[in-house]
Amino acid sequence: MTRTPVTHLRPASSRRRPHGVLALCAALCALLLIAGCGGGLSKKETHKPSLASVIAAAYASPQDGDFGAHDHLHGWVVLIHADGSYDTVRTSGMDTAALLWNSGGLHFTDRSRDYTLSGSRLTTVASTKDWHGYANGDIQIGLLPGRTPTSTVGVYNFGALRGAGYLTEVVTTTRGRATQRMLTGDYEEIGSCGGRVYGVTDGGMNLSAAAKHQMPESVRSVPRQQRYAGPAHQLAYLADISGTRPRFIASHDGAAPGSTSGSAAPCTHGILTFLMGIDHGTKGPAPRYTAELWRWNTRTGSLATHPLVTSAHRVLDDSRDDVGAAFFNQSSIAGGTLTWVGGTTGAVYETDLATGVTRTRFATGCRNKGLAEFSATMTTSSIALLCTDSNANARTPMRLKRFSRATGKPAAVVTVKGLNAAIRGNLVLRGIAVPPRS
């Protein structure tokens, strides 16, 4: 990688976040930090972690980019056992982080290392997330499987270079070695298709002039569309980010990519599928915040978009950030539909891939509101959520809930003893993972 002098990096915390729920969460966490509250996860720290009897893992860390926390505020991987007890593994922390659990084990990362826990063996690989001394790589966009079960690809938002756009760091870890690459662009939607990594970034300041110059003319020249207005109107670019620089495949004159809670976009038959929360910036009877289903073909560059509508073909109002903070992953597509969990309501939805028609499958009893929070994931057969109840306080226990995808019925509920009280104060629940066959 060619290295050029850096004049100024915008803090990574400037990355866009959904417009409602995370701002509220940030304010509450800031007040708790000022009050001097601390987490209690260190009391459960283990130096000999094992996946034996572990039914889920969670990542909790301080939101240091926003609240001025320092490196001594660690991040924690929480290993939840079937009896409701838990152990923790200390890491050097991330502002946001992702977990990946596949046949190769449980994978996670921090500012200086990449980890794989397989059985009772914890493997670490040196992997410093900095560039030219700027330790900004603590906002993880996602963690994707590599070409083997034990290899991973981590994608990190690095902030903005004045006058030259955003930087994204891509770290490939395989065979005991981590390789870092710095790319131009702000890839908030990522996915893996056939072993290659693809991302979607918006135009404007998020791409350097050099990157735009490298684009094929067919990608640069896109007719302006009129169906987007206000903040939503930006060019979106699809790129292969597997190499030393982005290979731009196609562009679309439409909505800019939005954050989706570290969710990796599923890819089937070379088509990257994801949801877009859109701010139209308008006032009046029509919803300002809506959502769309995007299906971008990584081979041909063709894009199909569908507004999310009800069965009565009414446009869904996304003012609650349900789509903007949705949870979905590689297992979400089945039977011609995308299954996802609303980021604020916690409800499970199903969207038809051909039409965008969306229906509510079932409620889970989890939601992001006030001091209540949750994180979700899914496998081909089940949906798992780690949450407190909607009327949560410090004494409310955190529960791991698992539902059958086929029937929507609860398959298991495990009360995780003491976890809510240990996290509440200066830590934020970042994500969860479950065994791939659960």
Image (cartoon, rainbow, N blue to C red):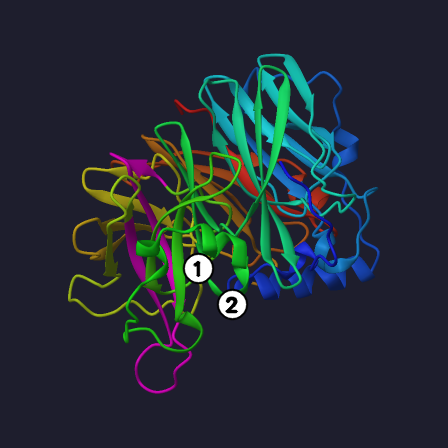
Quadrant containing the N terminus in the rendered view: top right
Q: Name the disc covering residue 324, or none.
A: 1
Q: Nearer the viewer, residue 53 or 165?
A: 165
Query: Residues under labels 1 and 2: Cα distance?
Result: 8 Å
Horizontal side of 379 relative to 46 (left or right) equals left
**Which residue, given by chain and number where applicable, does mark 2 sit on?**
19
Q: Nearer the viewer, residue 243 or 121?
A: 243
Residue 417 placement (x, y as % from top left): 64, 35
Residue at image coords 72%, 16% = 48
Q: Are marks 1 and 2 in contact (CB under 8 Å)?
A: yes
- Looking at the image, the residue that sits furthest to the top is 120
Residue at image coords 40%, 25% = 438
Rendered image quadrant of residue 59: top right
Horizontal side of 252 relative to 189 (left or right) equals left
- Membership of 294 in magenta stretch: yes
Q: Secondary structure at mark 2?
A: loop
Depicted 310 relative to depicted 351: above or below? below
Q: Secondary structure at mark 1?
A: loop
Q: Is residue 99 visible?
A: no
Q: Name the disc covering residue 206, or none.
A: none
Residue 213 placement (x, y as % from top left): 46, 55
- Membership of 431 in magenta stretch: no
Q: Reading the chain from its start, which is encountered first: label 1 or label 2?
A: 2
Residue 210 placement (x, y as % from top left): 53, 54
Rendered image quadrant of residue 358: bottom left
The boundaries of the magenta stretch are 266-295
Residue 28 placement (x, y as % from top left): 68, 63
Horizontal side of 328 relative to 223 (left or right) equals right
- Looking at the image, the residue that sits furthest to the bottom is 284
Depicted 171 relative to depicted 350: above or below? above
Q: Residues within 10 Å of mark 1 (few under 14, many from 20)?
A: many
* Identity, as a three-letter code, of the amino acid under mark 1: Gly
